Image (tube, helix red, strand yellow):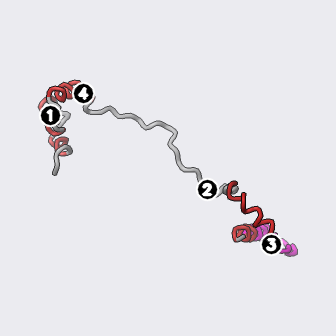
């Protein structure tokens, strides 16, 4: 009932704005049939909002670009280390990788694996 009264007031306001400046006689206020409105409430909620007031949520249409991993070239070597010693920690593996390629793996990379 409140929503119907609000919508009726909005429509009336819209008509008044459209007629601004024109010499027109005022219209009769809208009379709401409460019996019909309350009988319609049983199924009105199923229709949802009929006006386009709600925006659709943003959905990215392009796939996110995949970046190559810095461990990719060394994956076979890491697997062989872990098969030989399954209890190796990430810090020890990264220390071994630093010995293999010092330009790609630095002490800064090592800090991400250790507890500080």
Q: Which residues are magenta?
A: 10-34
Residue bearing the label numbered 2: 54
Q: Determine if residue 17 is in view.
A: no
Residue bearing the label numbered 1: 98
Residue bearing the label numbered 4: 75
Q: Earlier in the sequence, mark 3 or mark 1?
A: 3
Residue for point 80% across, 69% down: 35
Which label number is shown at residue 72? none
Residue 92, horizontal then vertical, whole percent: 13, 37
Residue bearing the label numbered 3: 21
Dot in front, 3 or 1: 1
Measure how far apart labels 2 and 3 are at the Cα level. 33 Å
Q: Is residue 51 left or right of residue 55?
A: right
- For the view shown, which residue lies furthest in the right direction? 25
The answer to whether residue 35 is above or below residue 82 is: below
Measure how far apart labels 1 and 4 are at the Cα level. 14 Å
Q: Determine if residue 81 is in view.
A: yes
Residue for point 76% across, 62% down: 40
Q: Secondary structure at mark 2?
A: loop
Evaluate if marks 2 and 4 touch, with contact meaning CB atoms under 8 Å apart: no
Q: Residues within 10 Å of mark 2 (few under 14, many from 20)?
A: few
């Amino acid at each position: 009932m409140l929503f119907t009264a609000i919508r009726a007031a909005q429509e009336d306001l819209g008509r008044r704005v459209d007629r601004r400046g024109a010499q027109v006689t005022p219209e009769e206020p809208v009379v709401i049939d409460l019996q019909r409105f309350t009988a319609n409430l049983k199924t009105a909620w199923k229709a949802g909002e009929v006006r386009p007031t709600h925006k659709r949520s943003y959905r990215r249409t392009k796939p996110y670009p995949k970046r190559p991993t810095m461990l990719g070239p060394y994956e076979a070597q890491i697997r062989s280390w872990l098969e030989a010693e399954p209890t190796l920690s990430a810090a020890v593996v990264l220390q071994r990788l630093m010995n293999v390629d010092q330009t790609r793996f630095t002490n800064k990379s090592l800090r991400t694996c250790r507890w500080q």
